[in-house]
Image: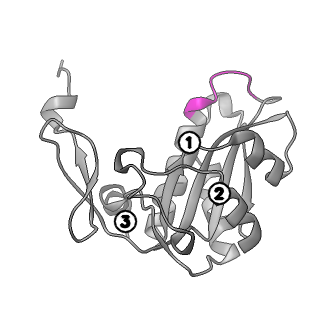
Amino acid sequence: MDCIESILSRRSIRKFRRKEVPADLLRKLVKYASMAASAMNRQPMKYVIVSSDEKAGEVFKLTRWAGYLKGKGSPSWDERPESFILVFNDRELAKEGYELDAGAAIQNILLGANSLGLATCWLGAIDRPAICAIAGTDDRYELIAAVAVGYPNQKSVPEPSEGDIKYYLDEENVLHVPKRRLDEIILNTC
């Protein structure tokens, strides 16, 4: 899959098949993240790969999913992701301005996973202190986000927004994700 195809086809997936993600693929995703742009090339992002069934299950219990769907979009225990990549800021390398680095790194994970046939969901509604305890990190590292990684068990399609941007499930359990039109997001051409 080429870069543009990956950008256009990537969607957040919240239901996964129970199939282990090979360790080498998870390491590739972290490699992709490490290649992202970084202010002053500080590279303050650090990662914890959570891939054991026990630890991934513990992290899963500390996440919240699909707020617009009020529980209907959350994965069941049998639909949970096999793995998580936890993204941290190293406070000794960056005390401010790291948010853009994190976004670039996470987007590389999402796009890279999509190109490898994996599904992801970028999660910010997480119990950070409890997840840090599972990850074994100290106060030097600030947990930015968790990225769920697995094999998809859900279809998600983009569609033009008609004013409402809330994603929804149809009667066949397909997730529809409204995207704003270009004429709504381009403010001006100078």
Give how far apart the Cα atoms at labels 2 and 3 are: 35 Å
Q: Quadrant of the C terminus?
A: top left
Q: Quadrant of the N terminus?
A: bottom left
* Secondary structure beneath label 2: loop
Disc 3 marks which residue? 2
Three-letter amino acid code of the residue under disc 1: Gly
Residue 107 versus residue 143: which sits nearer the camera? 143
At 57% from the left and 59% from the top, the residue drawn is 148
Percent coordinates x, y for residue 17 in the rendering: 50, 78
Could you classify mark 2 by the number of other residues whose Cα lies within 10 Å: few (under 14), some (14-19), or many (20 or more)?
Answer: few
Instruction: Looking at the image, tell me whether mark 1 or mark 2 is earlier in sequence order.
Output: 2
Could you classify mark 1 by the number of other residues whose Cα lies within 10 Å: few (under 14), some (14-19), or many (20 or more)?
Answer: some
At 20% from the left and 67% from the top, the residue drawn is 171
Instruction: Looking at the image, tell me whether mark 3 or mark 1 is earlier in sequence order.
Output: 3
Q: How is the image coloured?
A: one colour
Query: Is any part of residue 52 visible from this angle?
Result: no
* Secondary structure beneath label 1: loop
Percent coordinates x, y for residue 61 in the rendering: 65, 57
Percent coordinates x, y for residue 183 in the rendering: 13, 32
Find out whether residue 144 is within the magenta segment: no
Give how far apart the Cα atoms at labels 1 and 2 are: 14 Å
Compared across the picture, whether 124 is left or right of 49 comes to: left
Compared to 60, does 151 lie above or below?
below
Give how far apart the Cα atoms at labels 3 and 1 are: 28 Å
Three-letter amino acid code of the residue under disc 3: Asp
Disc 2 marks which residue? 61
Provide the residue span drawn in magenta. Answer: 94-100
Could you classify mark 3 by the number of other residues whose Cα lies within 10 Å: few (under 14), some (14-19), or many (20 or more)?
Answer: few
Disc 1 marks which residue? 124
Residue 125 versus residue 37: which sits nearer the camera? 125
Compared across the picture, whether 123 is left or right of 58 comes to: left
